[in-house]
Structure formats: structure tokens, C-alpha cells
Amino acid sequence: MDSTFSPRADSRAAEIFDEAPDGVPSFLDRLFDQGLLVRTGVDGLYGRSGAFESVVDALERLISRLGAADGAEVMRFPPGMSRPAFERSGYLKGFPNLAGTIHSFCGNEAEHAELLACVEARSDWTGHQQATDIVLTPAACYPLYPAAAARGRLPEEGGLFDLQSYCFRREPSLEPTRMQLFRMREYVRMGSPEQVLAFRESWLARGTEMIRSLLLPLAIDVANDPFFGRAGRMLANNQRQQNLKFELNVPVNSVEKPTACLSFNYHQDHFGTTWNLRQADGSVAHTACVGFGLERITLALLRHHGLDLAAWPDAVRTTLWG
Amino acid sequence: MVTSQDIREILATNEVLAPVAEQIGDDDSLFDRGLDSFGSVQLMLALEERFGIEFPDEFLTRKSFASIAAIRETVATVLHPQAA
Ligand SMILES: [Zn+2]
């Protein structure tokens, strides 16, 4: 497996990432100026242009083609999930700071008047907001596990699903690759440890081939999720030592801190135990997923091949649009 | 000095290990006994509280808390760094 960028890609990347002198617009500014992203006033929350979406659509078709032979079951969930399911998933143990919950006004008429007065006075109007039974989806696969477990035991050959969802993570940033609301395409495999690890291996190879065919420099590295706090450091160390997570990185904002565009995650029996998801023989199912950051791959393409899609290398255009 | 019995008492406060804490041998893998990643974090925090210590980052691994013997060594190293 690659652990460094290839020398050719390195020198190419060095040209692209030459320190911009003061006063030169950032990559994010240039995306706004070109109309590819649309400002909303919130860092990490952007509109997308038709050109930007044409790349996202092409990537989705490419990912579908790469996985077509496996016959994954397609499911699409909205970008919100059941709060009880979210609580049971354990997400709050690791990432309380990234979660987004949906709150709504639950007051009476007098409290409505109070709310409006607060808005008028620009003071805190959220006192009568209460948590609803919906939270924002943190990763495309989270709504799937309870739904799959509700069907009963997996078939002999295990389960394979194709997902895509907008996901939310509260981490405001000026790096265009760190959006608060972004789309993640996923394939999720459920079954025996051997079945899910074979799945992860095959996508490590396919994902690498995919990004190479888009003429992007890449490196595959052991990774960890951004677990919260000191306890989180131990969870992160555990995850790395057990090689549970790999990321396919492409330099987008900088060479030193490349951007994870794909991730390959082995959850062991975490979700199987949490949701009582069983294999055909009754033993707890293991799960793994491969995630494609659709905006991140699009931004990597824009960074390396330029903001004018028509001027992208023919090989890249052919891969995306035939 | 930290004894295996001290460690067993703390294991007995862990949800997963409580029912078997007294039967766990010094070198038995706690992970084989059902301890998961998050359980090992809770165990780590309970040890810090019991012994009034803070484990340095390099000890925050599965290996440090893998067995009663490993925990004894980890705690002893943090309590008496010169002996390590
Ligand atoms: Zn996933």
C-alpha cells in the first residue's frame, strides 16, 4: 500500500501549493469568485453551482459503476435520523461536540410572544426550543444498522448496501474541505469478519484505482476518528493500533495536511452488538463501510485540474463523463 | 504497592467485567472477557481516580489495560516513574 505521495505527484503538488503571497485570494475565495460555491454567511455551509453538482453527479455514477457487479441494495435516508437510534448508536460517547440536534418551538402563545420579543431585541430566543425526536445524520451509515437489524438475521452471504446522505458535523472552518453539511456516499458490508475484511480490501484497491484514474496524487494511511477529549485519545490510539480505519488522502488545502477523500472503516462487532444484528448462523455480525466524501473529491479535482471544468485533462473528463 | 486484588475491585465496578471479576487471572485478556474499547476507557478513568494519577498519553493504549498484570505494571510505572 502507498504510504507517501509519489515523487511525480509531490513535485506537481508543490507547484500547486506554492505559498500564496498576501492579498492573493484563498482557494475558498476563488471558489466563491468563480461561482462554484455560494456563500451563506456561515463557515462550512455553502451552496453549490450547477458545474460543481455536475462533478458530484459524475462521481456518483463512477462509484456506482465500480460497485455494480456486487449488487448492493440501494437505500436512501433523509439527512436526519431517529434520536433514540442515534443515542443507542454510541455516537455521543465519541463525538458529543460534532453532533447536531434538531430543536423546535414547543411553547404556548404567551411564549410565542416572548420569543418574538427576544428576536426583536436580538437576545437569546431559544429558551422555549426543545429537542425533537430527530438528530442530523452524522454519517450516512448510521440510520442503516437499526433498519437492517429489524429485518432479522442476515442471509448466508451477508448484507451489502449502497447509501448516500447529507451528513452534519459541527466543525466550522474556512477550509473548503471541512464543511458542516456535506454528502457522503457509502457501501456498507455486514457479515462474518472474513466477509467484511475482504470487502474493505477490495475497496482499498478500487478506491485507489478510482482516484488514480482522476489523475490525483494520493496516499493511503492508517487513521483515527476525531474522538473527543482525553478518553478520546485512548479510543483513537486503540483504533490506530488495530488498523480499524484507513483513509485515502489527497492534498487539497496543503501538502502537509492532506484531505481524507475516502475512508475504509472496520467496526468489528460494534454495530452488530449495539443493534443485535446477527449473521445467518446466529452469531453477532461484523460490519465495515467505505465512505466517499463527494464534495472533498470534487474540491480535490478543482484544486488539481483547475476551476474550469472544460479545461480538465481529457483522461479525467472521460473517466467522469465518458 | 498495587495488588492484583486492588485491580480486581476496580474491575468489579465495570459493567461488563463485574460478574466475572473474581475469576479473572492476572494474565487473562480482559478483552477476551468482553471488555470493549469504550469499556477500557472507563476502566482507565476509574484507575486514575482510585490511584490519584493521570496516565501520560503514551500509556493510553489497549496494551496498557489488557490484563490485570498489565494494569499493575502501568499503574506502578506512573506511580513510581524512577522504578520503570
Ligand atoms: Zn459508514
Image: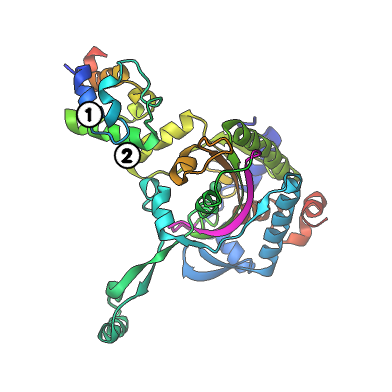
Quarter the C terminus of chain A occupies: bottom right
**Residue named by callout 1:** B10
Q: What residue is shown at x 27% (from left), y 14% (from top)?
A: B84
Q: Quadrant of the N terminus of chain A?
A: top right
- Left or right for A86, reference A114: right
Residue B55: percent from left, percent from top:
27, 29
Percent across and percent down for residue B20 are 29, 26
Q: Chain of mark 2?
A: A
Label 2 residue SS: helix
Foreground tag (2 vs 1): 1
Residue A46 can be seen, yes or no: yes
In the rendered structure, the residue with mark 1 lies on which chain?
B
Q: Quadrant of residue B69?
A: top left
Q: Amino acid at mark 1?
A: Ile
Kind of element beneath mark 1: helix
Q: Residue at image x 61%, y 54%? A: A163
Magenta span of residues: A156-174
Disc sitting over residue A174 in the figure: none
Q: Identify the residue position indicated by label 2 in the image.
A: A230
In this rendering, position of residue B65 left or right of residue A301: left
Q: Is the residue marked by circle 2 packed among few (<14), some (14-19), or many (20+) residues within 10 Å? A: few
Mark 2 is on which residue type? Answer: Arg
Visual colour scheme: rainbow
Pick the front one: A305 or A239: A239
Asked if ligand 1 lies within 8 A of label 1, the reply is no
Residue nearest the observer in this picture, A243 or A192: A192
Rendered view: A228 above or below B78: below
Q: CA distance from mark 2 to mark 1?
A: 20 Å
Whether discs 2 and 1 lie on one chain: the answer is no
Q: Position of residue A37 (x, y in %)?
A: 59, 66
For this view, does A175 lie left or right of residue A156? left
Judge left or right: residue A29 versus residue A86: right
